[in-house]
Image (cartoon, helix red, strand yellow):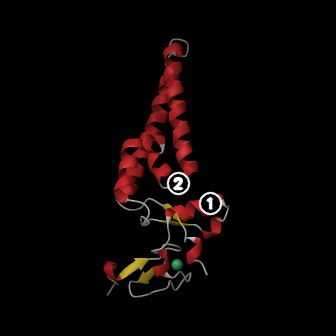
């Protein structure tokens, strides 16, 4: 008989399947109870200090963030990278923001160039809006289904 889903969990670090009763991941050695103390704030500190190895990207919303806020930011401000900024994935957030600015510039330019380029710009624009819209919808689905990755780490005082 297959192991029932509710009896197993996935290790947040290596994604290995573990039993709920296991305290430590048999694959990578992560002690699960320590993950409860991991925060997004500490993850951001470590990213700033270039300690990338100490940062985990987990799907579980850490204690210093709220899932409803993540959903709200992604739904309302997702096109500007809102959800990414909320979990401090700045690079990805800035990518969205720059994309949005670029789109706005294209919309403005299109007013002047529509005759010159015979509508080629508006087609290009439609293409990019489509891509951005799709990425935004994917983000909303990821956030709502708990699959959005959030960088976390343990605060210094929790490290041995
Ligand atoms: Zn593991």
Tell me if I can see residue 141 in this picture. no
Depth check, front residue: 142 or 3: 142
- Label 1 SS: helix
Depth check, front residue: 115 or 158: 158
Q: Residue 88 carries which label?
A: 2
Residue at 47 percent of width and 76 percent of height: 11
Compared with residue 51, is residue 9 higher up or lower down, i.e. above or below? Answer: below
Compared with residue 133, is residue 4 higher up or lower down, i.e. above or below? Answer: below
Compared with residue 41, is residue 54 higher up or lower down, i.e. above or below? Answer: below
- The answer for how far apart the CA atoms under marks 2 and 1 are is 10 Å
Q: Which mark is residue 124?
A: none
**Mark toward the start of the polypeptide (2 vs 1):** 1
* Ligand 1 is within 8 Å of the C-beta of the residue at disc 1: no
Residue at 49 percent of width and 61 percent of height: 150
Depth check, front residue: 144 or 116: 144
**x%, y% of residue 61?**
42, 64
- Quadrant containing the N terminus is bottom left
* Ligand 1 is within 8 Å of the C-beta of the residue at disc 2: no
- Label 2 SS: loop
Q: In the displayed orientation, state which residue is furthest to the front.
A: 157
Tell me if I can see residue 123 in this picture. yes
Mark 2 and mark 1 in contact? Answer it, CB < 8 Å: yes
Depth check, front residue: 77 or 95: 77
Badge 1: residue crowd in 10 Å (few <14, some 14–19, many ≥20): some
**x%, y% of residue 18?**
44, 82
- Quadrant containing the C terminus is bottom right
Q: In the displayed orientation, state which residue is furthest to the right.
A: 50
Residue at 47 percent of width and 40 percent of height: 80
Residue at 48 percent of width and 61 percent of height: 149
Q: Residue 47 carries which label?
A: 1
**x%, y% of residue 65?**
42, 60
């Amino acid at each position: 008989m297959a192991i029932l889903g509710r009896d197993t969990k996935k290790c947040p670090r290596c994604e290995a399947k573990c039993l709920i009763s296991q305290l430590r991941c048999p694959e990578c050695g992560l002690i699960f109870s320590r993950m409860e103390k991991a925060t997004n704030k500490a993850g951001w500190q470590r990213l700033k200090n270039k300690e990338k190895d100490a940062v985990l990207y987990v799907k579980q919303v850490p204690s210093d963030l709220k899932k409803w806020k993540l959903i709200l930011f992604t739904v309302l401000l997702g096109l500007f990278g809102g959800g990414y900024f909320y979990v401090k994935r700045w690079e990805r957030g800035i990518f969205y923001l720059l994309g949005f600015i670029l789109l706005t510039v294209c919309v403005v330019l299109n007013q002047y160039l529509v005759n010159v380029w015979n509508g080629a710009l508006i087609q290009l624009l439609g293409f990019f809006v489509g891509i951005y819209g799709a990425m935004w919808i994917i983000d909303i689905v990821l956030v709502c289904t708990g699959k959005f990755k959030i960088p976390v780490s343990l605060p210094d005082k929790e490290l041995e």
